[in-house]
Amino acid sequence: MTELSKPQHASAAGREPMPMPVPRVGPRRRTGLGVLLLPLAGLLVALGVWWLLTSVLEVIHPAVLPPPGAVLSAFAAAPVRFLEHAGDTTVETVVGFVLSSGSGVLIGLSLAGSRVLERMFTPLLVAVNAVPKIALGPLLVGALGWGQKPVLTMVFLLCFFPIVLSTATGLTSTPADLAELARSLDASRWQAFRKVRLPAALPQIFVGLKVAMPLAAIGAVIGEFQAGESGLGYLIVQAGGVGDTATAWAAIILIGLMSILLYFVLVLLERFALPWVRDTTSRG
């Protein structure tokens, strides 16, 4: 056998053997079963602690936090009423979120595209965001009356700033290698924006949207506290006024469930719109 016909991986005298290639292992994917079971397990733990504190140890007075059974009974007594109010709050949350998302992205685009506009209006945006929104409630009622208009305005004011900030940050932090690639290909400003800057900024924009979604629900409830004629916030005020804490807590739990649902709808939208993010990142 000639020297050329020897196997390439065989080690010659005095030489170290060639290392065998190690197969690459991709990031672990969570199964659908785990995605469902883990949140349910967390929910069961929370319910168990709630039941333990209110029904067994009785360290919390029922006027502050009723037992789970009392809250469930309050919901079972009038489920249609609760669902109608939940529907009104959901509509106000979604509409206000959509309005603030569109406006926030446009404002973020303007700030990212012009340093003059950024320096002119960023302090004003910070000042508006720092104002306690609940203090604006009476003013909104006086200017817009009762109903959905002041509620939607409260939603807008509460959640548009994270969207503006994430959009401007994402568009002004394009990776240097991608920006250099666009310049080397003589891409126009619009082409560089559409092909490089905007796709690179979308993950950051979705971060702002996911931060703003729970804030939209909070804004809807605050607006209903002060100017609403329906909705879960309105129901909490009515129930709290007569000492019906079980009904109030049932409404609070529905607000939480609504927020969870809307948040995960947004997460699914992100996965559909940005399929490359999960393939290029890993939680380790």
Image (spheres, rainbow, N blue to C red):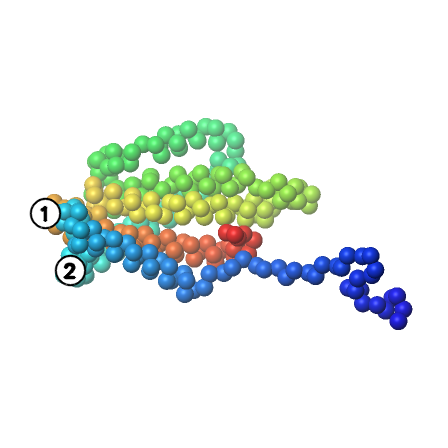
**Residue 78 image offset from top left, x and y in percent:** 15, 60
Considering only vertical position in the picture, is 21 above or below 174? below
Residue situated furthest bottom in the rendering? 1
Asked which secondary structure carries label 2, the reply is helix
The residue tagged 2 is: 73
Q: Where's the N terminus, which quadrant? A: bottom right
- The amino acid type, in three-letter code, at marker 2 is Ser
Is 204 drawn above or below residue 11 in the view shown?
Answer: above
Badge 2 crowding class, 10 Å Cα cut-off, few under 14, some 14 to 19, many 20 or more, is some
Camera-nearest residue between 282 and 9: 9
Dot 1 falls on a residue whose secondary structure is loop
- The dot on residue 11 is none
Is the residue 283 above or below the residue 31 in the image? above
Q: Residue at x 25, y 33 (%)?
A: 135
Q: How many marks?
A: 2
Residue at image position (46%, 54%) is: 270
Which residue corresponds to mark 1? Answer: 242
Quadrant in which residue 144 is drawn: top left
Q: Nearer the viewer, residue 54 or 270?
A: 54
Residue 78 visible from this viewpoint: no
